[in-house]
Amino acid sequence: TVVTDKAKVSPANAKDRPFPLEWTRNIGIAAHIDAGKTTTTERILFYSGAVHKMGEVHEGTTVTDWMEQERERGITITAAAISCAWNASCGPWKGIKQRINIIDTPGHVDFTAEVERSLRVLDGAVAVFDAVAGVQPQSETVWRQANKYKVPRIAFINKMDRVGADFHRAIDDIRTKLKGNAHALFLPIGKEENFTGLIDLVQMIAYTFEDSNDSLGLVPITGEIPAELLAEAQSYREKLLEAVSDFDDVIAEKYLGGEEISVGEFMLAVRKATISLNFCGVVPGSAFKKKGIQRLLDCVVNYLPSPIDVPPMAGEDSDGKPVEAPVDDKAKLSGLAFKLWNDPFVGKIVFYRVYSGFLPKGMSVYNPRTRRSERVSRLVLMRAMDREEIDKAYCGDICALVGVKDVITGDTLCDEDFDIRLEPPSFPEPVISMS
Ligand code: GDP
């Protein structure tokens, strides 16, 4: 028998984790200006239930009123990283609360270092397009950068409620202008003012946007596919199956042999295809449709990678030789300071992604640029309307550090014994102020 000496078990033991690493999604929302990035981000935060507590605090106010108040006060919607949680309504993680960290990806293209750094810290992205305007020139830049950093993505065709919206034209645009292997995951039910729901091509069910008693709409209303759309849905399901079977031998064999493919197998095949980077699932919707945004969140959980599904982050040692940051809590700590912020309450905070190891509050982290160590006095998770003090950050997490002063964006902060630099030295950037 193996006797384990409790005292010898490292504090970084995976058992300490509050939840497995595969329950985390670090995502960015990328878009051309005006496509609806801000609105989509806000609604993701609100419709994931983040507003729930707030509804109680501001009794009698609606979600929208609250959002307007918060906008006036300029709260954390613009933070470098905001955490929310989502219980997917279907798929392998159904009913299990997933942590979704939304990393702000600057929409402008001039600050390339900043854009590229934000693309490095995320594992997947939602590319937002305007259903009326389709693919616009700036979307091409963002798309190319996401290709360069190998960021798997889902396309969200927003504003399906607008006059002139065209879902299929937008998919064609992604194929022709961006050379993306784009395939519909859902079909819209109606469009413009009659945009009333979505057909899930994997599950072959319809979701309606109608309201239920549940004010947050966390329980989706599902039903049968409208008869007049059934043939179209079947044909698009077939196209989707064919597309993903290129990435999954089991599915390919079953598909060619005309065998039944279960919803679970189909979902895993879509996930595999997305993570391969050679496939992009497309979701129609509108940032204004609560239940549409919630289906987009289901897709984020089911199809975008967790930190263990992507290759480990590569860096260099002090001799310039390549080193990897193992995706493991038990490895030595390494992580990237990707944004600085002046918080009116706590002062300078450093947004940080842990790539390997784990970081307990109070630990000293080494900065290879300054060759000095500094103590992390507090660790904070930023949320839409509050911040949570945490004791530890684990491999794959994104959090904010307080107490580390001599740091610039792009700095590696790691264990003193770990000779790694995650990003080559770059120019200092200004500290962004919250006010
Ligand atoms: P961003 O520049 O990409 O951040 O875009 P915004 O989120 O600021 O949205 C640009 C404009 O489009 C705003 O006036 C939004 O109210 C509007 N908008 C965003 N999403 C939708 C949508 O789904 N439907 C409609 N009709 N308008 C939208």
Image (cartoon, rainbow, N blue to C red):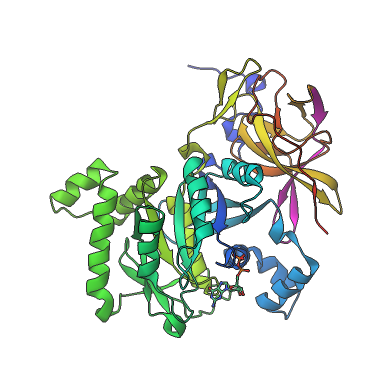
Q: Is residue 129 above or below residue 246?
A: below
Q: Determine the residue located farthest toward the bottom in the rendered image.
A: 193
Magenta stretch secondary structure, dominant: strand
Question: Quadrant of the rendered structure where residue 326 is?
Answer: top right
Question: What's the residue at 28%, 43% (across, down)?
Answer: 248
Image quarter where the C terminus lies is: bottom right
Question: What's the residue at 54%, 40% (across, down)?
Answer: 21
Q: Is residue 94 visible?
A: no
Question: Quadrant of the rendered structure where residue 202 is?
Answer: bottom left
Taking the image as shown, residue 365 lies to the left or right of residue 330, namely right
Taking the image as shown, residue 208 lies to the left or right of residue 33, namely left
Residue 136: x percent and y percent?
49, 63
376 is within the stretch colored magenta: yes
Tally the numbered discs: 0
- Give whichever of 359, 372 is nearer the camera: 372
Ligand 1 lies in which image quarter? bottom right
- Give whichever of 34, 90 is nearer the camera: 34
Q: Is residue 11 visible?
A: yes
Question: What's the residue at 27%, 52% (across, down)?
Answer: 243
Taking the image as shown, residue 134 lies to the left or right of residue 51, namely left
Residue 123: x percent and y percent?
52, 44
- Give whichever of 395, 164 is nearer the camera: 164
Q: Determine the residue located farthest toward the left in the rendered image.
A: 257
Q: Is residue 362 above or below residue 388?
A: above
276 is within the stretch colored magenta: no
Q: Which residues are magenta?
A: 372-389
Residue 167: x percent and y percent?
39, 70
